[in-house]
Image (cartoon, rainbow, N blue to C red):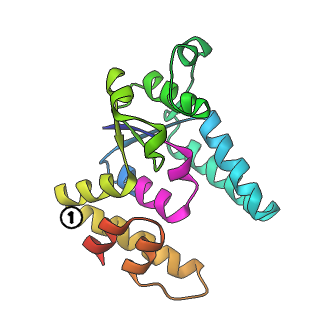
């Protein structure tokens, strides 16, 4: 399943690592655009120069790991589309250009299901997606969760419980499943 990942699911580290872990496990094929990655980098500037540098490095790693994931969007495609927030039209355009099956986003109100359906797309929340993947292959998604949890504990000054980490990352259903 090809999934266009919106900035709001790439920027938070734990959420991104869970989604990309599912991609590494072969469950999904991630897509994004240069503009989406640029939005992530600009959002990280709020954390200061270290946050921006870290985002730049993580983006470079993403591009290296998935060299075919970046979708080019023509201005003509974007010009014919409509969404409630004009700033999100590029996300829809990238999903269409990349032949995605769905857009993974937290911004539910900005991506009406009926508008996406007209383009043959679904809208999925990251928690919904991860939970559905877990239902289909609990062992694999549990391994993804364990790896993300271990890395969070390695990098953090505190010890996290799996459930608390995923709940804080706004992934309550998969937190309950894995916790």
* Residue name at image x 43 percent, y 23 percent: 96
Residue 158: quadrant of the picture = bottom right
* Residue name at image x 35 percent, y 54 percent: 22
In magenta segment, residue 19: yes
Residue 30: quadrant of the picture = top left
Of residues 156 and 104, the one nearer the viewer is: 104
Few, some or many C-alpha atoms within 10 Å of disc 1 (few <14, some 14-19, many ≥20)?
some
* Residue name at image x 37 percent, y 78 percent: 163
In magenta segment, residue 168: no
Task: Give the image location of residue 42, x and y in percent.
Answer: 73, 48
Of residues 64 and 149, the one nearer the viewer is: 149
Task: Give the image location of residue 14, x and y in percent.
Answer: 49, 65
Screen quadrant of the N terminus: top left
Of residues 107 and 5, the one nearer the viewer is: 107
Residue indicated by mark 1 = 138
Q: Is residue 157 above or below residue 92?
A: below
Image side of residue 153 versus residue 55, left or right: left
Magenta segment: 5-20
Task: Give the image location of residue 150, x and y in percent.
Answer: 45, 77
Screen quadrant of the C terminus: bottom left
Task: Give the image location of residue 76, x and y in percent.
Answer: 58, 11
């Amino acid at each position: 399943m090809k999934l266009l990942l919106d900035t709001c699911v790439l920027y938070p580290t734990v959420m991104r690592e869970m989604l990309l872990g599912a991609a590494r496990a072969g469950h999904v094929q991630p897509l994004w655009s240069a503009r989406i990655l640029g939005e992530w980098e600009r959002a990280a500037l709020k954390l200061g120069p270290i946050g921006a540098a870290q985002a730049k490095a993580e983006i470079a790693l993403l591009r290296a790991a998935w060299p075919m994931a970046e979708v080019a969007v023509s201005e003509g495609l974007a010009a014919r589309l409509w969404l409630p927030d004009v700033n999100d039209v590029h996300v829809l355009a990238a999903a269409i250009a990349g032949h995605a099956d769905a857009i993974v986003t937290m911004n539910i109100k900005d991506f009406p299901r009926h508008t996406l359906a007209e383009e043959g797309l679904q809208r999925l929340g990251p928690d919904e997606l991860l939970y559905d993947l877990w239902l289909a292959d609990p062992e694999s998604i549990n391994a993804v969760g364990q790896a993300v949890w271990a890395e969070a504990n390695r990098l953090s000054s505190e010890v996290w419980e799996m459930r608390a980490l995923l709940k804080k990352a706004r992934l309550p259903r998969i937190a309950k499943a894995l916790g």
